[in-house]
Image: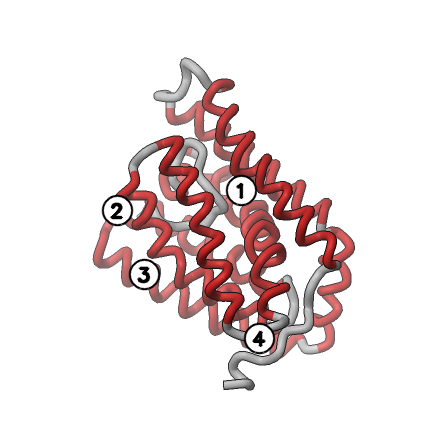
Amino acid sequence: MKRFFPIMNDDTEKGMHFALLAYWIFAFGVMPTWMPLFGDGFWDNLPVISWFEIAYHVINGVVIVIMLKTYLKDSFLNVQLDPKGFLKTVGFSVLAMLAMAAGLRYCLGRGMTDIYPIKEMSVALTSGLLVKQQPIFGTICLSLFTPFAVVGLFYVSIFAPVCRRNRWLGYVVVTVLMAVPCALDILWRGQASLTILIFILQLPMHWIACWTYQKADTVWAPIVTLAIFNLGTSLMAFL
C-alpha cells in the first residue's frame, strides 16, 4: 500500500495555502453572486450567458496560475526527473476516468453532459451545456483553464498539505471541503438534486486526480490528468 500511496513531498509554501483558501471568497462568493447581476436580462439567453461562464473559469484559471507561478515551475522538475513514471501515472488515471465516464454515458445518455467535464463551480451552465453552446471556446476553457483552477483551489490548498502528513486523510478532507462550493451552489441556484448528483459522480474523478498528485509527486500530474479528461468528455458531449 505504501508503494501505491507513497509519501508525498511536493507542496507549495505554507502561506500559499491560506492565500488560495482566501481566494475562495472571490471565486465561490463574489463572482457567483455578482455575475447574475451583470447578466440581468440575458440569463435566459444561453449563447450570451455561456460567455459569463467562460469568463468565470478563465479568470479563476489565470489567477491561480499567477499565484502558483513559482510552484508550477519548481514542481515541473519532478516531471523531468521521472518522465516515464509521470506518463504512466497520468495515462493509467486518464484511461480509468474516461472509461468510467463512458460507462455513465452509456447508462445516462445525454444526462451525462450535466456532470462532466469537471470544473470548480457553475455560475450559469453545466459543463456539457457550455460545450454545446460554445464548442470551440467552451472546450478550450474547460481543457486549459479549468484544470488549473480546480487543482489550485482544491488540491494544492487542501489536499497536498494534509496528504503530506497523512497519506489517506487528504482524500477525506478534500471531499468535505469540496462540498462547500456545492452547498453554496444550491443556496444560490437551487436544483439540489442535480447539484448533489454532480458532486457525487465527480468525486471519484477528483480522488483519482488527487492520487496522481500523490503518486507522481508533482502538481502537474492532476493538471494534465484533468486537462485530458475534460477534453475527452467535452468531445463526448457532442455525441
Residue at the extreme top of the image, as rendered: 41
What distance separates the C-alpha of mark 3 from that of mark 1? 21 Å
- Label 4 vs label 2: CA separation? 33 Å
Q: Amino acid at mark 3?
A: Ala
Question: Disc 1 marks which residue?
Answer: 141
Dot 4 surroundings within 10 Å: few (below 14), some, or many (20 or more)?
Answer: many
Could you say which disc has been placed on residue 4 in the image? Answer: none
Task: Report if the CB atoms under discs 1 and 2 are less than 8 Å apart.
Answer: no
x and y, in percent, of residue 161 in the image: 63, 64
Per the model, the C-alpha gap separating discs 4 and 1 is 27 Å
**Mark 3 falls on what kind of element?**
helix
Q: Is residue 192 above or below residue 154?
A: above
**Disc sitting over residue 110 in the figure:** 2
Amino acid of disc 2: Arg
Return the x and y of residue 76 as percentages of the image width and height. Answer: 72, 65
Q: Residues within 10 Å of mark 3 (few under 14, many from 20)?
A: some
Instruction: Give the residue type at disc 4.
Output: Lys
Asked if the residue at tag 2 contacts the one at tag 3, i.e. Cβ–Cβ closer than 8 Å, the answer is no
| Residue occupying image coordinates x 52% and y 24% | 34
N-terminal-most mark, 3 or 2: 3
* Marks 3 and 2, how far apart at CA: 12 Å
Left or right: residue 39 versus residue 237 is right
Query: Residue 88 at x, y = what percent?
Result: 55, 76
Q: Earlier in the sequence, mark 4 or mark 2?
A: 2
User: Does residue 147 lie above or below 181 as drawn?
Assistant: below
Distance between the alpha carbons at the discs numbered 3 and 4: 25 Å
| Residue under the image location 44 percent in, 16 percent down | 40
**Callout 2: SS:** helix
Instruction: Look at mark 4 in the image and give the residue it sits on.
Output: 215
Could you tell me residue 41's position as x and y percent? 41, 13
Report the residue marked by disc 3. 102
